Amino acid sequence: AYKANIFSNTAAASLNAEQKEIILEDGTVRRYDKILIATGARSLIPPLPNDCPERTVYMRTLDDSRNLKKLLETENMSS
């Protein structure tokens, strides 16, 4: 089971990766083990030549992250 804290509509001021801390805009400091920052922005899909469109993943939704996890578990993504 996963334990996750979700902070909606909360602005981050800075991130200290060495200390594993995120400092929120109001000065609150939160420690983390792993962090996912979702900005809510739409993915920019650049006009790139793509030889492997099935291995190109754009993150926007929770389902997108689940699809990426599934892809990483089933495919050799080292190259």
Image: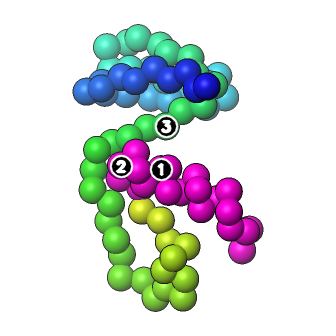
Residue found 38% across the figure and 41% down from its top: 38
CB atoms of marks 1 and 3 within 8 Å: yes
Identity, as a three-letter code, of the amino acid under mark 2:
Thr
Q: What stretch of residues is rendered in magenta?
A: 59-79
Name which residue lies at 55% across and 83% down: 52
Measured as percent of width and height from the top left, residue 20 is found at: 61, 24
Q: Are marks 1 and 2 in contact (CB under 8 Å)?
A: yes
Q: Is residue 17 left or right of residue 14?
A: right
Q: Which residue is mark 1?
A: 65
Main SS of the magenta part reads helix
Cα separation, mark 2 vs mark 3, equals 12 Å
Give percent across and percent down for residue 70: 58, 56
| Residue under pointer 2 | 61
Image coords of residue 40 (percent x, y): 28, 44
Q: Nearer the viewer, mark 1 or mark 3?
A: 1
In this rendering, the count of numbered labels is 3
Mark number displayed over residue 57: none
Q: Quadrant of residue 33?
A: top right
Name the residue at 49% across, 85% down: 50
Q: Is 77 on the left or on the right of 69, as rendered?
A: right
Q: CA distance from mark 1 to mark 3?
A: 10 Å
2 or 3: mark nearer the eye: 2
**Crowding near the residue tagged with mark 2, few <14, some 14–19, many ≥20 C-alpha atoms within 10 Å:** few
Label 1 and label 2: CA atoms lie apart by 7 Å
Amino acid on which the number 3 mark rests in the picture: Leu
Q: Which mark is residue 36?
A: 3
Instruction: Note whether 22 is above or below 59 in the view shown.
Output: above
Q: Quadrant of residue 79?
A: bottom right
Q: In the rendered view, does 36 fall on the left or right side of 63?
A: right
Instruction: Give the mark, 2 or 3, whose residue is nearer the N terminus.
Output: 3
Characterize the local packing of mark 3: few (<14), some (14-19) or many (20 or more) Cα atoms within 10 angstroms. few
